[in-house]
Image (cartoon, rainbow, N blue to C red):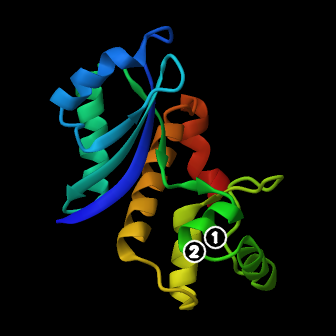
């Protein structure tokens, strides 16, 4: 089994609920491998270090544990996923300037999810690109958890598609 580090952010079923009340239930449900952040009422962030055969199983089991402890909790975001260049540089241990130079000098650098100030990428796409180019040694478990977090976030967003749009999605991006 490998160890995976990731964060799951949830909204609570009652926006006015005090997240402090959920901590004991989360521990009973198997979330004792997470640090729990309770900054905003109605929101919860869990920073997991979970041992599992795969990143997808780690994320899935953690999300199921949270939903068992807090029925009606909704996943907001799985991390590590959406990042700026500074985030990528921090994760990989080099400068933002170096990351920016890689982006500007390589026309095949992954396209951002959002192109603006700041631009946002899926971490997995940048890590995969760096790995394929052989530019940097990418920790396999980091790439695996970034890919799984990206899939979780994409799946969450797909739930918001209207049925009529959903049926035409294949033709739009083919």
Question: Which quarter of the picture shows residue 136?
Answer: bottom right
The kind of secondary structure element at disc 2 is loop
Residue 173 spot, x, y in % from top left: 64, 57
Could you say where residue 18 lies in the image, as x and y percent from the top left? 43, 12
Q: Residue at x 19, y 62 (%)?
A: 53
The residue at 64%/70% (across/down) is 89
Rounded to the nearest whole Å, what is the CA distance between mark 1 and mark 2? 6 Å
Task: Answer with the quarter of the image where residue 27 lies.
Answer: top left
Residue at image mark 1: 89
Residue in the foreground of this view, choosing between 36 and 150: 36
The residue at which mark 2 appears reads as 93
Assign the C terminus to one quadrant of the image: bottom right
Horizontal side of residue 171 vs 43, given as left or right: right
Which of the two residues, 121 or 27, is positioned nearer the viewer here?
A: 27
Residue 40 pos. (x, y %): 54, 22
Asked if labels 2 and 1 touch by Cβ distance under 8 angstroms, the answer is: yes
Local packing at callout 2 (Cα closer than 10 Å; few below 14, some 14-19, many 20+) is few
Q: In the image, 110: left or right of 159?
A: right
Task: Report the residue at 48% width, 85% height from top.
Answer: 137
Q: Foreground residue, 54 or 96?
A: 96
**31 versus 74 height, above or below:** below
Does residue 1 lie above or below 5 as drawn?
below
Q: Residue at x 55, y 73 (%)?
A: 92
Give SS at disc 1. helix
Q: Which mark is residue 136?
A: none
Could you classify mark 1 by the number of other residues whose Cα lies within 10 Å: few (under 14), some (14-19), or many (20 or more)? some
Q: How many marks?
A: 2
In this view, 85 is above or below 16? below
Quarter of the image that includes the N terminus: bottom left
- Picture coordinates of residue 65, whole percent (x, y): 23, 34
> Looking at the picture, does residue 11 appear above or below residue 56?
above
């Amino acid at each position: 089994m490998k160890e995976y580090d990731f964060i799951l952010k949830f909204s609570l079923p009652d926006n006015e609920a005090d997240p402090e009340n959920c901590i004991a239930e989360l521990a009973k449900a198997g979330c004792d491998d997470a640090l729990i952040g309770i900054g905003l009422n109605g929101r919860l962030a869990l920073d997991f270090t979970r041992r599992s055969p795969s990143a997808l199983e780690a994320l899935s089991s953690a999300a199921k544990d949270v939903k068992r402890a807090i029925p009606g909790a909704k996943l907001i975001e799985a991390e590590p996923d959406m990042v700026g260049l500074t985030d990528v540089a921090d994760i990989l241990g080099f400068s933002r300037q170096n990351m920016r130079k890689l982006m500007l000098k390589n026309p095949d650098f992954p396209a951002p999810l959002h192109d603006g100030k700041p631009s946002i990428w899926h971490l997995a796409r940048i890590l995969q690109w760096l790995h394929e180019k052989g530019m940097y040694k990418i920790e396999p478990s980091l790439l695996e958890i970034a890919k799984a977090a990206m899939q979780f976030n994409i799946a969450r967003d797909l739930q918001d598609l209207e049925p009529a749009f959903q049926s035409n999605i294949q033709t739009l991006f083919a």
